[in-house]
Image: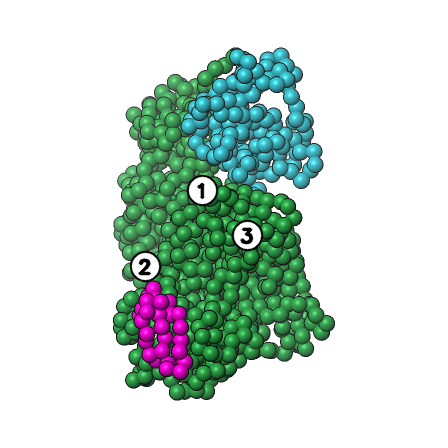
Amino acid sequence: MERLIVVGNGMAGVACVEQILKYSPRFDISIFGEETELNYNRILLSSVLAGEKSADEIILNDACWYEKNRIDLRLGVRIVDVDSGSRTVTGDDGSITSFDKLILATGSSPLIPPIEGAGKPGVYAFRNLEDTRALLDRARSGARAVVIGGGLLGLEAARGLQVQGCEVTVVHLMDTLMERQLDAIGGAFLKSKMESLGMRVLLGRNTRAIVGAEQAEGVEFDDGTSIEADLVVIAAGIRPNVELGRRAGLLVRRGIVVNDYLETSHREIFAVGECVEHNGVCYGLVAPLLEQGKVLAATITGNRGPKYQGSVPAAKLKIMGVDVFSAGDFSEAPGNDAVRYEDGSLGVYKKLIIRDNRLAGVILVGDTADSHRYMDWLTSKSDLTALRRKLLFPDPAEDTELDVAQMPDAKVVCGCHGVSKGTIIQAIQERGLSTLSQLKECTRASTGCGSCTELCQQLLKAVAPAAPSEATAALCKCFALSEAQLREIVRTERLRTVQDVLNIYGNRQGCEICKPALSYMLDMVWCGGHDEDRSARFINDRVHANIQKDGSFSVVPRIRGGVTSPDELRRIADVAEKYKVHMVKITGSQRIDLLGVQKADLPKIWADLGMPSGQAYTKGVRMVKTCVGSEFCRFGVQDSTSTGIELERRLENLFTPHKLKMGVAGCPRNCAEATVKDIGLIGQEGSWQVVVGGAAGKKVRKADLLVTVETAEEALQAAALFFQYYRENADYLERTYDFVERLGIARVRRETIYAPMAVQQGLRERLRKSKAHSRDAWLEGDEPRHATQFVQIEPLENVLA
Amino acid sequence: MNERNGTGGKQWVRITECANIPVREGRTTTVGNHSIAVFNLGQRFAAIENRCPHRGGPLAEGIVCGATVVCPLHGWKIDLETGVAASASPDAPCVQTYRTRIEGGILEIEIPVAGAPREETCETTRVHRDRPIRWVQRKLLTTRAEMRELP
């Protein structure tokens, strides 16, 4: 066995070791890491800062992995010297270790520009977990943070700090944000997007000094202006760590120079990652490092052959809702043709650079859905002559799956976890996956930076038999994400308040469209175990009554199945008189509406009625309309009243994407109009039909048959299954008739009554949980959520009265 | 009493403990003949006339988005700083605004003294294009439906 030493326990070094382990064993491997951490995903530090992930969640190789592969891991030891003659490395702990082969994977360090006071307490770099922890420790609500550097890392740090509650200013030396990846227009689009998230962006400012007596208190620019700061982050770029290369006598320019086999100028010493320079280029992005690691693994294990031929530099900003992608050369030099598209109000900017009929570079801001196709054109150097008129807007593809179909199986889809297309397809087929969350759980694909989410979705669509196609329209102008995406995020990021979702993924303010939608989403996802924020609810859901045109409210008590009693009717009549209700109205839903009630009277009315809320004011379960049924009716064949009352009992007090009305008919004459209800049960001789998606409102639609079953209990079960399925999958304000039509009844059946038992149980269990958390809203009359929930504020003094 | 006197025929009136108005919500209060909607915006409070210039909706019951309140009746958006309704037209109608301050945990509102001419920040009676909330909802759904139909 030969002794292999790897200096650097980062992504490049460990990824290379993973590749080496795929060959037959020939090395005793030692890895030295200067940090005291296991190998973690450095590109996700911004997610840790943003609180989306914990430090543990970004670990790529845990302690077991090192143990299992018999790798001798020495953490917290910095290698200070390499003797290429005697083939030894010296650690800062004085240890000397000999090697047969050496890999330098020393990475890079933050570039600290010559700014006076850059060493003060309160000034941070943003490069490793330690920096991130220090920043998290320091960041607090209201703190003023200044980020020097408007590149990828700077912007991600800025967003992370903002999510932690800081007031953030980004200071950039150049006139364009991310000027190495974007042109002036793209930079301007990005700037306005960042500003709309609530960040201040200062361009063309050269920082002269960081001022403050004991610690950073402000930043001064060379134009004489200054701003105050509680903390300063310097993210002005990186510098390859080449010191060990120099000490070993290797050829070093900007980085440690390597050839196409990742060999340095010394036979037994190799280098990989951000510390190397290949063909005059140093790479600071993850994809090139992984490619290099594969080549080096072949070289070092005696399988020299594969060559590293450089990578197309490609970068994607990892800020949720801020889509920026850039690859290749985007300069408009002579000989380069630029193809542009820009829409200022949507914030979408696309630019392609074509040279010799081939794609040379691409910039995408605001819409990066096509980045994969452009990346393919770039790396394959495809001739685009025939596509020239369709570069930005390709023909609505006859074959939407062509992109993924063309990818080789070995191609890595998820760069963060190294998951290939082949692995994903295998997982989909063998384990019967059909949703993105299942795929994430099984393969870890798309759980890293998330930039491959789109591709994973496409693979699911292509391979899984009935993969749902996710709607992609953004929820509203506050978010760049669809409701389906937000549901996924709320679930995986464990968000429990509307304001958290807005702060992290939206524009912090929200609007009257997204706030109620998010309120519903959180309640549904957490089965009622979320943190309810009444300020995000419509007034009806704050006071549990329906606001009328004059600002008064209406009160509709629950009368299950439309069946009431003399005693209830007497109480309703008393209340109507006592509170001088303007109108008592029999509604179309077999209930009684008391109209023209003042807000302050609501709790008293509820107490006097002694009946639960009919939820007539909310996007929730309204009622079950029933006919008389077999108990009295001479044509009735099933007991529609008691079945209807039971259906209402099981589902009442729950919220739904839109209002939900039900009906139960005791015979096919359908007096309860069950065929035009969201959910209908129709009794027949010896069986029940369960129908869904009916409507008799703005639109008239006959409900689709979900299933026919023998007993009332089975009918109730099928209805509940559909009910929860609708709750989980419809967009907010989407009635069942739109929902069922959008999905098609075949798919609804497949995913409810014909779904695998485990899926059905999941739906039932979540419904059970939600039901357990739900309560009659009118109980808040006795225990208001807030002292002034139902009252008008009386001024402490009324001098003008 | 001196510090109570505001400027130009106005007076600071003690209203209520700040905690009585939950963050991002509004409450109604009446001072003299002023029906006022008071909002807790987190760092500060805002007070405006509690009557939407559109159809008189109770603005205190609206959803607060940043420094805007959305009328619960038909979705008009009123700027809490200026009282102006969001509108495409340059002469949008508006509601009266009141200055607020916090003294020892008590919210105070500056009210014009009775008899002083009512301050009109702009004309309130203009006819305005109706943009009910249901229109927004419908728009949202049609847009989604259209997006879905795209190949």
Q: Residue at x 49, y 46 (%)?
A: A216
Q: Which chain is tinted green? A: A
Q: Residue at x 69, y 68 (%)?
A: A332
- On screen, residue A297 versus residue B73, left or right, reads left
- On screen, residue A171 versus residue A6, left or right, reads right
Label whose residue precedes the other's in the sequence (1 or 3): 3
Image quarter of residue A81: bottom left
Q: Label 2's element?
A: helix
Q: Amino acid at mark 2?
A: Val
* Residue on which the image places disc 3: A116
* Residue on which the image places disc 1: A141
Q: Quadrant of the N terminus of chain A?
A: bottom left
Q: Amino acid at mark 1?
A: Ser
B1 shown above or below A471: above
Q: Which chain is tinted cyan? A: B
Q: Which mark is residue A759?
A: 2
Foreground residue among A102 and A313: A102
Magenta stretch contains residue A75: yes
First to last magenta residue range:
A73-99
Q: Are marks 3 and 2 on the same chain?
A: yes
- On screen, residue A137 versus residue B69, left or right, reads left
Residue A685 seen in the current view: no
Alpha-carbon span between mark 1 and mark 2 = 42 Å
Instruction: Measuring from the top left, give residue A466's x and y in whole percent.
Output: 41, 65
Q: Residue at x 54, y 18 (%)?
A: B12
| Label 1, residues with CA under 10 Å away: few <14, some 14-19, many ≥20 | few
Instruction: Measuring from the top left, give residue A350's x and y in whole percent.
Output: 63, 62
